[in-house]
Amino acid sequence: MPGKQLIILAHGGAGSDNAHSDGTDRACLIGLKLLQAQTPALEAACRAVEILEDDPRFNAGTGSRKRTDGSVRMDAACMDSNQRFGAVSALQHIKNPIHVSRAVADSKYRLLTGEDAHQYAVELGFEKVDMTRVESNAPGTDTVGAVVFDGSQFAAALSTGGTGGSRPGRVGDVPLIGCGLYAGEHGAVCATGHGESITLNLTAYRTYEMLGRGVTPQEALEAALSWFEDA
C-alpha cells in the first residue's frame, strides 16, 4: 500500500555475536516482505522470530541452551496493540515455541507452561523435535525478539531457551507480560538480558509508558538501561 509506513526490528539477544547479524537481517527481510503483503503485525513479528528460532546460532528454538539436567526448556511470548497476548514457558520438544505462544493468544488462556503447554502444542499439530540432540556452540546469546509496525498496529515477539546451565524450573522475563515485552497504541518493546533483573524492573511496560508520554525511542532506551547496574 503506497505511503504506508512499515517498520520491523529484530535482535539476536544480549551477548550475541555481531558476525551473526546476517541472521537478524534475514529475519527482518522476511518479516518486511510479509508486511508488504499486508500480513498483520503480530504474524510478521512471530514469523521473524521463527527465523531466529531455526538458526542454531541463537539461544531460541533449535539453538536453545541446556539446563543443568540436560533438558531444553523454552519460553516464548507475543503481543500486539489490540491487547492480544499469549505465552508459553518451560516448553519442551516443540520446534517453534513462538507459534505456540501465538496460538495461546487466540485462546481463552494467556500463559501455558510445562507439560500442559507441550500437550496443547501437540493437539494443535505443532512439529515435535528432540531438542536435546541439537548442539549449539554459539557463545553467550540470550533472548531473540522482534518488534513490528504494520502501518496501524504494533506487535512484539520474544523467544528464548533461557539461561544455559540454570535449574530446569527457572523462568525469566520472556513469558511475563510487561516484563520481557509489551505492545500498545504507542509502540512495542521487547527486551533481552538478565531475566530476573528485567522482571524486577517491569522493563517493557515502564519503557512503553515513556513512549506514551512522548519520550523518543532513543531516550526511552537510555532511561531503561540506567535501571540496570551493568548497563
Image: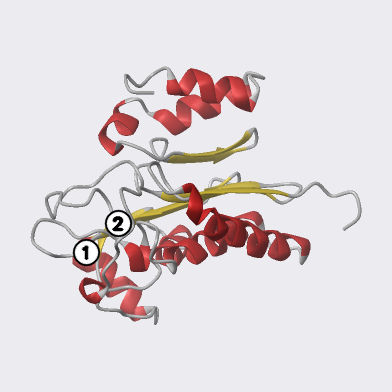
- Residue drawn where x is 38% and y is 19% of the image: 227
Counting from the top left corner in percent of width and height, residue 208 is at: 54, 29
- Mark 2 / mark 1, whichever is N-terminal: 1
Pick the front one: 142 or 96: 142
The label on residue 72 is 1
Q: In screen coordinates, is 178 left or right of 9?
A: left
In three-dimensional space, the C-alpha distance between marks 2 and 1, rounded to whole angstroms, equals 7 Å
Rendered image quadrant of residue 132:
bottom left
- Residue drawn where x is 69% and y is 65% of the image: 34
Q: In screen coordinates, is 48 left or right of 121?
A: right
For the residues labelled 2 and 1, say whether their Cβ atoms are less than 8 Å apart. Answer: yes
**In the image, farthest residue toward the right:** 2
Indicate the amino acid at tag 1. Val
Residue 95 lies, with reference to residue 31, above or below; the image says below
The label on residue 161 is 2
SS of the residue under disc 2: loop
**In the image, farthest residue toward the left:** 69
- Residue drawn where x is 49% and y is 47% of the image: 18
Q: In screen coordinates, is 3 left or right of 226?
A: right
- Residue drawn where x is 55% and y is 55% of the image: 24
SS of the residue under disc 1: loop
Residue 122 lies, with reference to residue 25, above or below; the image says below
Q: Quadrant of the C terminus?
A: top left
Density class for disc 1 (Cα within 10 Å; few <14, some 14-19, many ≥20) is many
Indicate the amino acid at tag 2. Gly
Density class for disc 2 (Cα within 10 Å; few <14, some 14-19, many ≥20) is many
Residue 58 lies, with reference to residue 218, above or below; the image says below
Pick the front one: 56 or 160: 56
Counting from the top left corner in percent of width and height, residue 79 is at: 51, 49
Counting from the top left corner in percent of width and height, residue 77 is at: 42, 53
